[in-house]
Image: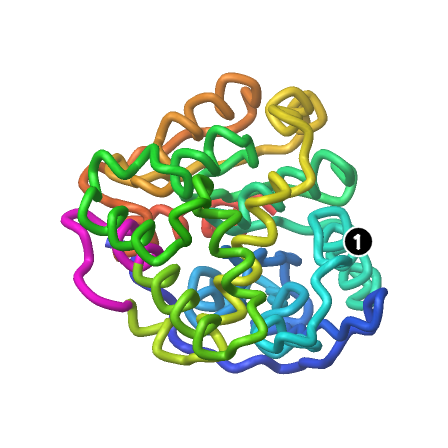
Amino acid sequence: MTGLYPEIEPYEHGMLDAADGNSVYWETCGNPDGKPAVVLHGGPGSGCSAWHRRLFDPEAYRVALFDQRGCGRSTPHASSPDTDLTSNNTSNLIADIELLRQRLDVDRWLVLRGSWGTTLALAYAERYADRVTEMILFGVTTGRREEFNWLFRGGVAVFFPEQWERLCAATPAAESDPVEAYYHLLHDPDLAVRQRAAFEWCMWESATPAWPPTPGLAPRFNDAAFSMAFARLVTHYVRHDAWLEPGSLLRGADSLADIPGVLVNGRFDFQAPVGNAWELKRVWPQARLVVVDEAGHSPDARLAQELIRATNHFAAAR
């Protein structure tokens, strides 16, 4: 069994002056002379966490983590109704990653993350393939509209009918698209309306990562500012199809031809079905697919074990 590495603290952190008035929080941990790696968190809007640090051998890696625009310790925060999300888009997140790479004086680095972070990682790597040494992706998504529809417009509801009915019950009867409905509710001038919308959205997000469905609200959503920013950012990205052309990341996978990769997916991942990873593997021969039976979307010990095996493998191959 490959367990998580011990908890560590960053040896350096700061705020990156990004465009459009954004300040992006970043931190580095591990060995300052180690193999460079960057973690792209999920959500969008989840923020980086101490758990991500523990996926890397701290003697072998120099790991950079950051909070994407509008969430975590980055400012302005998307929980505020005054925060304009116009410039918060995939292209600008990619620009922020490159700005951070330059700030940390890194030539090339390994890219790791799951869920939304895999879409962002693919978009980044296809644009800057010469800056990526390897990729480790879990809970694989590729930014296609059908993937967004599956999770947020009723596809997966066949497995979660009670939770889906509750999500839709809180939307105006005249609105057929729950994403559009919640986007507007989360931007309502009435604080109580926004708070209820954030709660209901996060109840749905809490139900689907594991099987059987998780009852109640996941602990991370107990923070009101976190849940508000998370719900606003997810609906913002989904209603715009993450500003990606349909199927563009799969079509652009030729750019990854020289990048080794590991794809890790739970067999019972309802948020990011294993079929996503299968389709990506078909167009990215350099990637190895690891399917973890009985695991879901939540990064439990079984998934973490495979991720650590992957980081150890690439550290040894340095």
The quadrant of the picture occupied by the N terminus is bottom left
Residue beneath disc 1 = 95
Q: Image quadrant of residue 76?
A: bottom right
Q: What segment is highlighted magenta in the picture?
A: 204-217
Residue 316 horizontal/vertical position (percent): 52, 48
Q: Nearer the viewer, residue 74 or 83?
A: 83
- As helix, strand or loop, the secondary structure at mark 1 comes to helix
Residue 202 horizontal/vertical position (percent): 37, 63
- In the image, 72: left or right of 264? right
Residue at x-position 76% and y-position 44%:
131
Q: Residues within 10 Å of mark 1 (few under 14, many from 20)?
A: some
Is residue 49 shown above or below 107? below
Is residue 201 shown above or below 302? below
Is residue 150 shown above or below 66? above
Q: Amino acid at mark 1?
A: Ala
Is 9 a magenta residue? no
Residue at x-position 77% and y-position 58%:
87
Q: Nearer the viewer, residue 261 or 211?
A: 211
Instruction: Please say which color scheme the image uses.
Output: rainbow
Q: How many marks?
A: 1
